[in-house]
Every structure is written in structure tokens, then in C-alpha cells.
Image (tube, rainbow, N blue to C red):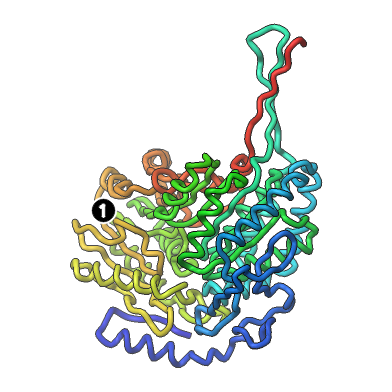
């Protein structure tokens, strides 16, 4: 498998591509797909493979009859030809969800809890197949895909239990003979728009609390990687979740995708929008939802700082930074984007981090020895390359990697940022396997640098000084902080950001509140 060694040299690009070409046959890749001849993923349960959308309990074609191809990101082979839907299909799904809400919203919490647990067991029993689907459609390594399936399912389990904890409360009245009680009820139909980087987990993180609260859903699956979402719908059907409660749509990039989002935002029958994606698109959806004043949740872009102070455990910081940057090829919204290292430990950290990055293996994700798969698109690859070239032009040193390979592959890369020069990573996420290391001298300086952005999703820092831990945690303008850890995601933790990283929280004890509203009941004459 491909292992990167050494400092950047003129022949590195040629060497990298040659190694990738030598792997083009991928001898360890399973063959034989669920749907005759499409793609390169082998499933124990072929029934999970769907190319139609799921509306009102039925698997249906697009009304227009249009389809779109889904590609294996590592081999560029066609995995599937799925539906390509638009506004009219979306309106059908909204009608189905609206009709289903009339009965689903009146079911007991125990009934919804039991169905969610049934779905949890279905996903658990099919976890390896789901992981293989994710590898093929998304590109991530099998270990990351397995982790995603478990992470996705943890939200099903968590919100199944939280369903039983939906509670109201009473408040004292200022008037005699009056009692005030507050109950919580489901908001209605929820439009859920999910990204491609976690094509299963980002959907279960939205679907589970919505269903637990008593809402019905219209899910827009990511067009780059829709197969695991459709497989989830199949398992939900098997679990006994009634028709119309979950509807899953797929549209192609461009006009159809825009029309689908617009239909969800403008419909008076949709009461809630939950979106995970870019800040730019989040702002568009907010504007489109304004006419109906929907309840919104927005988990948008970030630019995570990762700070290593002079009193940090350097070895722990290195291993956590490696995972935080290169998990899923750096294509996560909470991946570190700016790596700040104190001058006193800078040389030690850089050498150890470089040594670890050089051991990362790039290739087709179904190989058990692979750490990083391909990027999701040519645009992602081009963005990573352009960031590296811009930093080189600004005088930064590329310590490891820096080049793209055949197809959608990109080398794990380490860049030593030029001091005092603003980098592309100061402006936006790279969303790829490029780690940029900055040197700093003081706590005040690094807090200023870390906060010098308009987004605030996640941040990380390493320090063994308890006083500093509290100071820095309170000073960083982000919604989530990892203190002496680079892995923060958990279904038990409220996930979300501040500033232009959005609002609302997913997961945790309050995550279901995004799909509920409070109703005050005032009893007189008591």
C-alpha cells in the first residue's frame, strides 16, 4: 500500500501517481454487487441496495423519469443509477409526511421508543454491509466507515431512550385559583438536509430525534453518496416504522437540488428545517424559510483551531492531532484546520507529527490497511491542491506530501505556515488531508489568532495546567471544545456551533427539543 516518505522533491508527484497506478486493479477489492453489474461493493444482504427513492412507504422512480449515476470514489466505476428528483417529487413526499403526522404525532412515547430500538437492532445487524456501502459511495477507509455506522446507530439508541424523557413542567401562578402547566408537542413535518461526508450518521442524527419527538420527516439524501441513506430507509421499513413517517429523496447537483431545497423551505406544511452543510447554503435556506417562519437548525462550516501549549503532553497532542486532521481524509466539519504549536515545543511536535503522517496509507478503503481513501470530488481535490500551492507561493514550507494522485486521491500533507502571512486556511476550511502548522509565543496571541474567523464550530487544545484549561475553554469562540482530546463527537453531547457556524444543537439531552415546541396550559377556577 502507498506510504509517503521524505521531504517534498520535484519527482514526488510522479512517484505518487506511479504508486497509485500500480494499485489500479485493487486485488483485495470484493466483486459482485447487489444490482447486476453496478459498481464494486459486495453485500451480504443485497436487499439494502436501492436506486429508487422512498416516499409514503413505497420505492418509486422520479416523476420525470430522470436518473443520475453514483460513482465509486476510488475506482470511478458506476455504483448505481439512482433517481434524480425535483420539486414535484418533494411535494409528494411533503404530502405523505403531513398525512402521516396526523397519526404518528398521537402515538405514545413507548411506541416510538420501541420502533426506534427496532431500527437500532436492524442497523446493528447490517453494520458491515452499511460500512461497505459508505466506503464505496463516500471513499473513506473501512475503519472510518465502521466507526460511522456505530456512531450513526448511537443516535438511534440515544434518542430512543430520550423519547421516554419528554417532559413538561408546572409554574406557579401570580393569581389565586389559577394553575399553569407546560407540555411539549412535536413541531410537525421536518425537512432534513444531510451532507455527503457522513452519509448515514448525519441522517440518523436528525431522523432519530424527529421521530422520537413525534415528527415525520422528508430527508434529502446527499447526491454524492445516497445509497446508505436509502439502505437506512429500507431498514426503517423492516423495523415497522409506518409509511410516510420517513421519506427519502435524491436529486442531482444544480437545478433539481435547489428546487428540492426551495420546496421544503417554502412549504407551509413543513414546520422544521435541519441542515448540515456550508455556511453559504445555510444562509440561502434561512432566506427561503423566512416567508413561513420555520423553526431552523443549522450546523454549518467551521475552521477548527488545534492548540498545543508549552505544557502539553506532546505525544498525546501528536496522536490526537493526527486523528483529528486525517480521519475521513480531513473531510469532516470538526477536523482541525489550523494547528497552532507553542515555540518551546514546536520542533519536537513537528518532527513527531511528520513521522506519523509519513506512515499513513492511501488507497481503496476496503483494504484493511488503508488509513485514507480518495476525496469525494474533483472540486475537493482541486481545493486542497490550490491551498497548498497558495501557501507555497506565500513562502510556507511543504514538509510532507502536497500532491494529488490519479483519480480523486491526495497525499497526506503537512505545511509549515510562513509567520506573519495570512494563509488560505485562515479564511476557509480546506476539507482535505492538509495540516497547516503555525508557531505561536503566548496564550494571548494564540487566542487572538484562533478567534480571528467568523465561524465557531469546534476547537481543541492541549495543556496540563488546569487554570489555563478553564481560561482557554471560556475564551475560544466555538460551540464545542476538546481539552486534551481531538475526538469529541458523541451522541450524548450537544453538537453545534456559534457565529456563522450556525445555531441549534444535535444530540445530547437537549437535542430533541429542536423538534418540539412548548405549549402553556392555564387552568382557571381551581
Q: Is residue 370 above or below residue 122?
A: below
Q: Which residue is pictured at 54% across the width and 45% down the height? A: 505
Residue 145 picture quarter: bottom right
Residue 449's x, y, as percent? 28, 49
Q: Nearer the viewer, residue 497 or 141?
A: 497
Residue 47's x, y, as percent? 74, 75
Residue 371's x, y, as percent? 50, 74
Q: Quadrant of the C terminus?
A: top right
Q: Is residue 325 left or right of residue 141?
A: left
Q: Nearer the viewer, residue 472 or 256?
A: 256
Q: Which residue is pictured at 49% across the width and 76% down the height? A: 373
Residue that badge 1 annotates: 440
Q: Is residue 500 above or below residue 84?
A: above
Q: Nearer the viewer, residue 197 or 286?
A: 286
SS type, badge 1: strand
Q: Residues within 10 Å of mark 1 (few under 14, many from 20)?
A: many
Amino acid at each position: 500500500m502507498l506510504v509517503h516518505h521524505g521531504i517534498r522533491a520535484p519527482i514526488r508527484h510522479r512517484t505518487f501517481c506511479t504508486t497509485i497506478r500500480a494499485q489500479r486493479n485493487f486485488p483485495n477489492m470484493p466483486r459482485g454487487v447487489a444490482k447486476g453489474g453496478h459498481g464494486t461493493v459486495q453485500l451480504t444482504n443485497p436487499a439494502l441496495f436501492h436506486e429508487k427513492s422512498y416516499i409514503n412507504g413505497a420505492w418509486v422512480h422520479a416523476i420525470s423519469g430522470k436518473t443520475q449515476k453514483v460513482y465509486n470514489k476510488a475506482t470511478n466505476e458506476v455504483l448505481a443509477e439512482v433517481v434524480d428528483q425535483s420539486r414535484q417529487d418533494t411535494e409528494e413526499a411533503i404530502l405523505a409526511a403531513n398525512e402521516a403526522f396526523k397519526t404518528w404525532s398521537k402515538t405514545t412515547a413507548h411506541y416510538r421508543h420501541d420502533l426506534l430500538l427496532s431500527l437500532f437492532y436492524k442497523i446493528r445487524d447490517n453494520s458491515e454491509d452499511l460500512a461497505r456501502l459508505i466506503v464505496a459511495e463516500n471513499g473513506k477507509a473501512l475503519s472510518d466507515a465502521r466507526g460511522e455506522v456505530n456512531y450513526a446507530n448511537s443516535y438511534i439508541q440515544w434518542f430512543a431512550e430520550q423519547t421516554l424523557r419528554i417532559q413538561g413542567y408546572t409554574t406557579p401562578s401570580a393569581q389565586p385559583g389559577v394553575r399553569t402547566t407546560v407540555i411539549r408537542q412535536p413541531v410537525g413535518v421536518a425537512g432534513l438536509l444531510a451532507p455527503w461526508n457522513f452519509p448515514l450518521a448525519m441522517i440518523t442524527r436528525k431522523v432519530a430525534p424527529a421521530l422520537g419527538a413525534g415528527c415525520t420527516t422528508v430527508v434529502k439524501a446527499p447526491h454524492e453518496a445516497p445509497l446508505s441513506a436509502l439502505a437506512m430507509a429500507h431498514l426503517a421499513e423492516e423495523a415497522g416504522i409506518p409509511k410516510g413517517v420517513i421519506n427519502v429523496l435524491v436529486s442531482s447537483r444544480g437545478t433539481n437540488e435547489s428546487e428540492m431545497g426551495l420546496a421544503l423551505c417554502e412549504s407551509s406544511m413543513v414546520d422544521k428545517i435541519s441542515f448540515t452543510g456550508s455556511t453559504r447554503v445555510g444562509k440561502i435556506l434561512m432566506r427561503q424559510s423566512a416567508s413561513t417562519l420555520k423553526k431552523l437548525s443549522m450546523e454549518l462550516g467551521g475552521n477548527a483551531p488545534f492548540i498545543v501549549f508549552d505544557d502539553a503532553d506532546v505525544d498525546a497532542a501528536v496522536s490526537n492531532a493526527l486523528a483529528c486532521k486525517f480521519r475521513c481524509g480531513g473531510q469532516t466539519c470538526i477536523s482541525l484546520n489550523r494547528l497552532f504549536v507553542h515555540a518551546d515545543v514546536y520542533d519536537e511536535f513537528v518532527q513527531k507529527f511528520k513521522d506519523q503522517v509519513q506512515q499513513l496509507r492511501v488507497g481503496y478503503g476496503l483494504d484493511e490497511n488503508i488509513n485514507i481513501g480518495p476525496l469525494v470530488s474533483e472540486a475537493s481535490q482541486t481545493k486542497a491542491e490550490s491551498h497548498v500551492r497558495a501557501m507555497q507561493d506565500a513562502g510556507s514550507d511543504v514538509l510532507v506530501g502536497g500532491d494529488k494522485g490519479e483519480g480523486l486521491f491526495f497525499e497526506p500533507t503537512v505545511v509549515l505556515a510562513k509567520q506573519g502571512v495570512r494563509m488560505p486556511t485562515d479564511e476557509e476550511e480546506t476539507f482535505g488531508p492538509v495540516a497547516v502548522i503555525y508557531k505561536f509565543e503566548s496564550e494571548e496571541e494564540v487566542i487572538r489568532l484562533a478567534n480571528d474567523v467568523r465561524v465557531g464550530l469546534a476547537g481543541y487544545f492541549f495543556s496540563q495546567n488546569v487554570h489555563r484549561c478553564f481560561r482557554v475553554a471560556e475564551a475560544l469562540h466555538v460551540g464545542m471544545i476538546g481539552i486534551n482530546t481531538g475526538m469529541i463527537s458523541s451522541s450524548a453531547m450537544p453538537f453545534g456551533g456559534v457565529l456563522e457556524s450556525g445555531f441549534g444543537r444535535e444530540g445530547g439531552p437537549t437535542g430533541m427539543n429542536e423538534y418540539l415546541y412548548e405549549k402553556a396550559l392555564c387552568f382557571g377556577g381551581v
